[in-house]
Image (cartoon, helix red, strand yellow):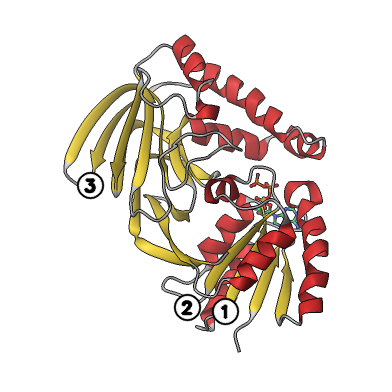
Amino acid sequence: MMMYYFIVNPNAGSRKGMRCWEEIKPYLLEEGIVFRELLTKGEGDAARFAERITEKGRPDVIVAVGGDGTLHETVSGMKKGTEAKLAFIPAGSGNDFARGMGYSKDPKERLRSILADENGAVINVGSTFAPDASGCFLVSSGIGYDARVCHMVNHAKTKKLMNRLHMGKLTYLGIGLRGLFAAELFEMRLVLDDSREEIFHDVLFASVHNLPYEGGGLKFSPDARPDDGFLNLCIVAGISKAKMIRLLSRVPGGKHIGCPGVYSFRCRKAEFFMEKPQFFHMDGEVPGQSCHVTAEIGSENLQILG
Ligand SMILES: Nc1ncnc2c1ncn2[C@@H]1O[C@H](COP(=O)(O)OP(=O)(O)OP(=O)(O)O)[C@@H](O)[C@H]1O
């Protein structure tokens, strides 16, 4: 029999994960749904749970309850080509995946729509490779400034406190501005789909998007679609820092596209070569720095319910 596995991060979004689970669990019991509850205790748990579930090779449903980090870990752990389907109930602080997918914020409404969906929809999963690290992404992957900000936010002592005060976005804003002043612009060679080559000077960042939002609701790539088999690439380069600040103020509304210094492409594969190692991220997780990073999409898909 098909089983629903709920992978819950109770601490996501300053305990929103637990509140959300306490709201939906009684509903599952009332409805007589057969399910298992798996609470994460720390980094890596969601991936380990997902790996163990998908090793069984059954068409089970894995419902991740938490933030984008929990979703990312869950997908990372799922075996390639698995029969299992994925679903997500957002309870994080950023929730860029849910925003991009147009999900309801109401946990019960989300649950009902997951339970009512038998077939689901196919979404693309991106892959990022560097010599020392590789991984998947559902939302975005990037090099340079945005990855550096993720790295700083992930290590910020203030993040937990600000999240508790529901001011997580201020952490991003403060670190984002600090990161911009400190950012070292870099030279980059880009190879698109193994055929087209472009050189960029004074690059702030280069990011590929499977969904429109990143960084807690910033509309980096308004036209990105998770099921079109393409990545939308956004590069900011070749303008002064003062202009970059003005430009970044347009990003929340997605109004930066088409402005001087912004370069947009659509591709299946983007290969980035830098002279100096740069931070890179997958869905906000930063494995390190590299001079050579490749991002691609299309070879891996997931069935998602709800
Ligand atoms: N019980 C736990 N306590 C603390 N951290 C946990 C626990 N379980 C998992 N984690 C770690 O917390 C990380 C962040 O969690 P998650 O993304 O779900 O919440 P968030 O950071 O509040 O939301 P968002 O990513 O949307 O901003 C996970 O990637 C995981 O490594």
- Could you tell me which quadrant the N terminus lies in? bottom right
Residue under circle 1? 60
Sequence-wise, which precedes: disc 1 or disc 3?
A: 1
Q: Which mark is residue 193?
A: 3
Q: In the drawing, does residue 85 fall left or right of residue 226?
A: right
Q: Is residue 46 above or below residue 61?
A: above
Query: Taking the image as drawn, is residue 45 in sight?
Result: no
**Secondary element type, mark 1:** loop
Q: Amino acid at mark 2?
A: Glu
Tag shown at residue 83: 2
Q: Residue at x 63, y 65 (%)?
A: 113
Q: Quadrant of the C terminus?
A: bottom right
Left or right of 178, for residue 203? left
Label 1: how many Cα within 10 Å (few below 14, some 14–19, many 20+): some
| Tag 1 and tag 3, C-beta contact below 8 Å | no
Residue in the picture at 59% in, 57% down: 71
Count neighbours of disc 3 (C-alpha within 10 A) and say few if under 14, some if 14 to 19, many if 20 or more: some
Q: Are marks 2 and 1 in contact (CB under 8 Å)?
A: yes
